[in-house]
Image (cartoon, rainbow, N blue to C red):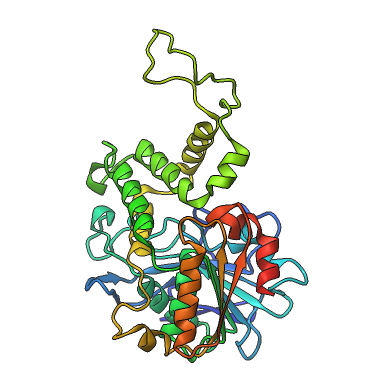
Amino acid sequence: MSVVVIEGGVAGEGKADPSTPLRFAQDDKSIVPTYEGDFVLDGHLLLECGRTLADPTLHYAVYGRLNAARDNAVLVGHALSGSALVAGWWPELFVEGGLIDLKTDCVICVNLLGSCYGSTGPGSVDPETGEVYGATFPLISIRDNVRAQARLLDSLGIATIPLAIGGSIGAMQALEWAILFPERVKRAAIIAVAPLNAMGLALNHLQRRAIQGDPHWMEGNYLRQPRAGLALARQIAMLSYKSPQLFTERFGRNPNRNGEDPWALEVDGGGLSGGRFDVAGFLDYQGERFLDRFDANAYLAILRTMDTWDPVRGYRSAAEAFGRIQAQLTFIGISSDGLFPPQEVRALAEEVKAAGVRAEYREMVTDHGHDAFLAEQTELIRLLQ
């Protein structure tokens, strides 16, 4: 087992390598990580589903530096299709005078298991078989991720976390950290999340069906990306990320802005398809631009991680689960969020508070829908401060 020291701090234990090239990196031209690399967990990681992962890799990024006491680490959880490069997708977090001050804080973001941004996922090679996991990749839970992250932080010498923060699936991680490791987390910000309701589960089901129905998916063992299925899945997801109010304001019933005419017949006179409305053009564009930055099986894996999260599962009651928490929690709901409705986020906050936890609920009033925690970052940071 090796320990690599990077600029005054332990970078990782196991097979961490500071020279590891960036993989699937999202461009960030403003704030560069102090360190980005891999942490390899030696041996087998036992998963909640009963299977194990052999020597799994966690890809992570560090911004700032750990202090001598190693008690200044802010742990950030990314959303479904995000990466460890948090400054690329949540830059307002680092604005001077904001929530994070890199003069004193050290930000750590760990890529989810199952992802295609460096951590072990369906596209990785199973060291026990020498073959790509593909369709054999196991179900990974939020708790599995948090337990693996805890081993990474152990290797960095981090015993306590002043703040764990995340939005959507990142917030699932932050809350699970507070439950599983109550003595380690001081504060947590839980943004736009609750266990998925039936509508959220239904939309995720349709996204899976879109991918699995693509003939190029080949039962998960594809040689080329099932592009049509993945693009359609992303378009379905966009319906849950935005709000009806935002779609009405931006698109209305306008024809597609490239000049297509929805009322015109096809060239041969058929009326089964034709020119798109503007909202259809937007959805098609979102589907296409997603294809070169994400992998279909990774998308399926993380959808399952999201679907199966229930912080009370395995405990006798909500009071037992949430009663473990010692941290002070701030829950943020989004007024127009259709994926995780604000009333459900508030209900979760109240359930946590009823267990004796110091918890409060605040709400972003916006038409941006679930994506507001990314689209209106300044307002989010104001609420958190």
At 38% from the left and 87% from the top, the residue drawn is 319
Residue 110 placement, left or right of 218: right
Q: Nearer the viewer, residue 341 or 230?
A: 341
Q: Quadrant of residue 213?
A: top left
Residue extending farthest to the top is 268
Residue 128 is situated, as x and y percent measured from the top left of the image, at 23, 65
Q: Residue 144, relative to residue 297: is it above or below?
A: below
Q: Nearer the viewer, residue 55 or 331?
A: 331
Residue 206 placement, left or right of 6: left
Residue 313 is situated, as x and y percent measured from the top left of the image, at 31, 77
Q: Residue 329, relative to residue 115: is it above or below?
A: below
Q: Nearer the viewer, residue 34 or 267?
A: 267
Q: Quadrant of the N terminus?
A: bottom left
At 44% from the left and 80% from the top, the residue drawn is 351
Q: Nearer the viewer, residue 226 or 175?
A: 175
Q: How many marks?
A: 0
Q: Quadrant of the C terminus?
A: bottom right
Q: Is residue 16 visible?
A: no
Q: Is residue 338 visible?
A: yes
Q: Quadrant of residue 72?
A: bottom right
Residue 267 placement, left or right of 105: left
At 46% from the left and 67% from the top, the residue drawn is 344
